Amino acid sequence: MRLFLALCAITFSASSVFSQEYKRMIEAETYSVQEIIDNAEAYFENRSKGKGTGYKQFKRWEYNALRLMNEDGYLRTIAETRAEFKRQEAYLNETANTRGVLNDNWQELGPTSMQPHTSWSPGLGRITSIAVAGDDTDHILVGAETGGVWKSTDGGQNWASLTDYFNNLYVYSLVIDQSNSDVYYFGSSGGDVYKSEDQGATWNLLSTIANSSVNKILLHPTDSNIMYASVANQGVYRSADAGLTWTEISNATRGYDIEFKPGDPSVVYASGENVYKSTDNGVTFTQLTGFTTGAKMMAVTPANPDVLFITEALGARFGALYKSEDGGLNFTQLADSSINYFGLALNGIDTFGQAPRDMDIVVSPVDENEVHLGGGNTWMSLDGGLSFDITAHWLISSSSSENIGYCHADVDILLFVGTDLYAGTDGGIFKAEDTQNITSDYYTDLSSGMGIKQLYKIGVAQGSEVMVSGGSQDNGTSVYREDDGWRDWLGADGMETFILDNTNYVFGTSQYGTLYRSVNGSDTYGGLNEPGVGQGNWVTPFEKGNDNAIYVAYDQVYKSTTYGNTWQSVSQSYPTSFNNLKLAPSDNQVMYATRGANIYRTTDGGATDWEQMTTPGGGISSVAVHPADPYKVVVTTASSLNVFVSTDGAETWAVYKKNLPNFSALSVIWDHNGRDGIYLGMDYGIYYIDNDLEEWVPYNTNLPNVIVNELDINTETRTLYAGTYGRGTWFSPMFDSTLGVDAITAETLQVYPNPAANEINLRLPVASVVDVRIFDVQGALLSYYKDVQIDGEHALDISGLRTGVYFMRVASDNGTITKKFIKE
């Protein structure tokens, strides 16, 4: 009844829509990025590339892969990333006492709720999985694609993140142990399964099943040692030891869904491109027949345990619906492909679809005739699948005009909890209570409180009043204004965006460089005519200059002094489109643009041809020009050396890797602080360096372990902003070597006794609320205590730790400090 395939995830796992070869190449981890791109482009050469074809998911993967690959053109494996994260945590603990306490104190700006305004498809972020704790229907978990695991104990009214400081925020399946609701599992990419025994406070890698996304985990209702997992491009697996080891249980080459027969968990159904049934607790399986080839999802219902529904894809669109009333012995076909229930059209007549990525079916637990389908929209049948009516559409305007619900496009999961229906979508989680009555308020959005925007880019207005814009995957462009908070301004995939200083002009883009503008601070929007012929890259460079000029880079660079009404070319034409464009803030006549690993420069505003400069090495992922020196440039690259600085306008380069971890450098910005300060965003965290520092220092206090796609600065308020891919927008004070009077330091924090036996005490001179994390010497997080109230002294129970050396990291709004201690 559920499926998620992670083609577009940063971890590069893949689905099997159309069984394209390039998706298997991604998961193999043995092919270069260029080999995969060539294979994908060959596949799509004579096929449609519009919405619902899978091409958009490929282009997302391509954009991220080109920024994250190494200098050899290959992507870091999941195991390598996990090992490097652990090594970096150990390094930070060991060297903590050599660093001063910095001024970083990250706070979440959001958005943390859907705010419909002028967006045609408003939403928050992608939900891939939902789990409920048995009869306690208020105890809900959801998984966000790159935003981690979230928990609610009041039926979705409030949410708390459980994985912000864990090393993996990529979640594709979730389950709660029905016999012990303290125990959670989540499935990730690369076949990884994680387990928590303390309601998500800490997580441990339990096992790695197979090299593909774990898109469903199923636990036996009375024996928690028995578990099943469907693994996207590998098959279906069974564990008899609570997930420590796994055995493949069918000859399926795909794993999409697993279900128990209601009331009899010895009977198990499994699906991939075929359907299998076991009657001996999953030990052996028999293939069921009566279907054609195509991805399949299943649904069962306690209302009639012998009923089994199968929905089947035809390529990426809806193919057929089947029903068995005798536990899978015989099937009747109820629907064919004449109506595309996985598409986008109100009447189901289109050719779009993203199955098996967006494809699900559920049946009411109290009425076997109430059947729901999810794809681009959601549909309902009240006659056992013979006919369907649309319950919600992906365009909010259609919800009002057709008197049906609004549900964000691309439904990943449908789940009945009692008689309530939940939908996990690319825009959040939605709930229907009166499921048989179709109205314009059919669904209620339950996503409020989750900061899970997958931001590509952000824009920050200069001035004392805070105004920020952000473009995100699937959920368009949102604008924050200090006087009224966030509003969803545009739909589609939001990309580059900025706000002209001291004006009401807001600019945004969607994929391939489609341009938009607001002249009234995002109250309304209008499209702009794009200059030139053809389209830009997936994320097209779009920049503001001095005197309210704006610039966009396709295969040429264009400039407008009329707010985008008219354009003029300011560069020669190139064979392919640009990836980056940056203007020197102190002299807009000096500009830099990049294509792949090549960098180009003009010093006369494009009056003459741009000059190709020296390549620093590796594909260039971001560029920043010094605020006061147009010839001082820093770039990040897809290479092991990460960061390069030039002081002569990109003619020569100095390596700035220094002590940086082997993560990918993705975004960079200069600070005009008199010390040539540089902030660097990576796929794990933010780092800072300047002329007074010999090495990079982490600038991460209270920031989740999430990809940082862009950094921006409000120079007037001295505030640094981070646009993250999965946890929205965050902000922090800028670097300052002067500490506040209440800062936590090695001197003010006392940890004793040391060595300690079963209990260790923390003492601070002033009352504080802190987060405490305990690591082993290898950098593994063992314990996490959130919002600990310290008023004088506080004792922590460490009786569960083995004898050895550990590190305690204590963080508050006033800083972070790490102490080493010994457990006797």
Image (cartoon, grey):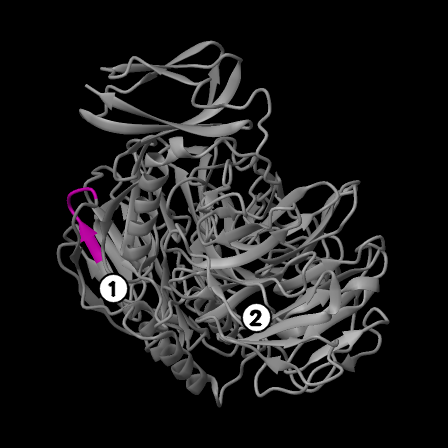
Q: Nearer the viewer, residue 599 or 389?
A: 599
Q: Position of residue 191 (x, y in %)?
A: 28, 56
Q: Amino acid at mark 2?
A: Ala
Q: Quadrant of residue 743?
A: top right
Query: SS at mark 2?
Result: loop
| 342 sits to left or right of 601 | left
Q: Residues within 10 Å of mark 2 (few under 14, many from 20)?
A: many
Q: Residue at x 66, y 60 (%)?
A: 121
Magenta residues, as a range?
237-242
Mark sitting earlier along the chain (2/1): 1
Q: Decide if residue 165 is on the left or right side of residue 198.
A: right
Three-letter amino acid code at the position of disc 1:
Gly
Please state, as top left, top right, bottom left or bottom right, where the C terminus lies in the image.
Answer: top left
Q: Image check: 688 left or right of 202?
A: right
Residue in front for this viewpoint, 677 or 213: 677
Nearest to the observer: residue 153 or residue 90: 90
Q: Which mark is residue 650?
A: 2
Give the number of the disc on residue 235.
1
Query: In this orientation, which residue lies closer to the viewer: 188 or 422?
Result: 188
Indicate whether residue 730 is drawn in magenta: no
